[in-house]
Image (cartoon, rainbow, N blue to C red):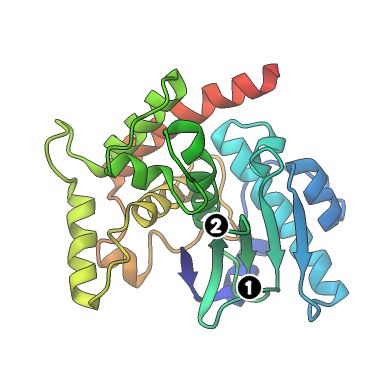
Amino acid sequence: MNRLKGQGRGVLKRYRDQRRGPDYRQGEQVSFNDIKQVFGLNHIRLGSWVDEEEKHKAANFIFDALADLAYILKLPPMAIGLRQSLNLAFGSGGQPGVQAHYMPPARELALAKNAGAGALAHEFWHAFDHYIASKAYRLDCAATTFASSCWLNDVPTISHPLNQRLEALFQTSLLTADGQDSHDYVKRAVALDKQYGRYYFAHPSELMARAFEACIEVHPEVYNPYLVNETLDSELARAGGYPDPEHRQQIFLQLLNYFAPLGEALQRE
């Protein structure tokens, strides 16, 4: 559940120059404690090699990225922390050659200090996919189970209108319109796995994470290369590793069909 390193420093420059979206901070400097409080995170861990200047820059980048994500999904900002179960690590606990990853046992989303930019949306989906599994499916143990895998393996669903919408999202993303066959997006991922000799691109959680970030990147009102980057112009994109434009639109409508009423329900609590 990770994103391989890309051009993190280049993305940071593009973030400063190109981000488009609401001005949540009104030009103010925020802290990682602000991020924890506003987005309802459980804990934030910073690496010992992250200096003060890097902390200030990263806090602003991450704050705006999470705020953009909440805005796009029509969620209250506090919902991003998944009921205060999600942990964030910055510049700490990284893996060689990986720009970001999500660790299910710790429920921790980790961003590399210089290369984590562009991977936040992808890893947030993994965190959400893990979190929602026990809320949507009847499981004995959900410690390392993802909702997308439950759907693929026909695990019984917990009856709830939102869970029906979640299953509709999976079906639109991974099956043909009639629901009778794997979508071409899935078939392209299977071909990539055969090419590289490993089961990765066609894993349901990775298929959904790429579909999710692809939809976030093409939002008409918000563009944030710290949140997501290179789903349109990258080697993987050219190899068919992301949904095509028409499919993205279909998936995005289902994302809003799920997250918008979820946000409304959370606002009423």
Q: Nearer the viewer, residue 129 or 183?
A: 129
Q: Is residue 180 above or below residue 101?
A: above
Q: Nearer the viewer, residue 61 or 96?
A: 96
Percent coordinates x, y for residue 164 in the rendering: 38, 24
* Residue at horizontal 18 percent and vertical 71 percent from the top: 194
* Mark toward the start of the polypeptide (1 vs 2): 2
Percent coordinates x, y for residue 205 in the rendering: 39, 53
Q: Is residue 99 above or below residue 132?
A: below
* Residue at horizontal 56 percent and vertical 68 percent from the top: 100
* Residue at horizontal 58 percent and vertical 54 percent from the top: 224
| Residue 30 visible in the displayed image | no
Label 1 – label 2 distance at C-alpha: 17 Å
Relative horizontal placement of residue 133, taking residue 149 as reference (left or right): right
Which amino acid does the dot numbered 2 rest on? Pro
Q: Nearer the viewer, residue 95 or 8?
A: 95
Relative horizontal placement of residue 25, taking residue 242 as reference (left or right): right
Figure quadrant of the C terminus: top right
Disc assigned to residue 112:
1
Give the SS element for disc 2.
Answer: loop
Percent coordinates x, y for residue 38 in the rendering: 79, 42
Which quadrant holds residue 140?
Answer: top left
Relative horizontal placement of residue 234, taking residue 35 as reference (left or right): left
Q: Nearer the viewer, mark 1 or mark 2?
A: 2
| Residue 70 visible in the displayed image | yes
Q: Which residue is mark 2?
A: 104
Give the SS element for disc 1.
Answer: loop
Which amino acid does the dot numbered 1 rest on? Ala
* Residue at horizontal 23 percent and vertical 69 percent from the top: 193
Percent coordinates x, y for residue 105 in the rendering: 58, 58
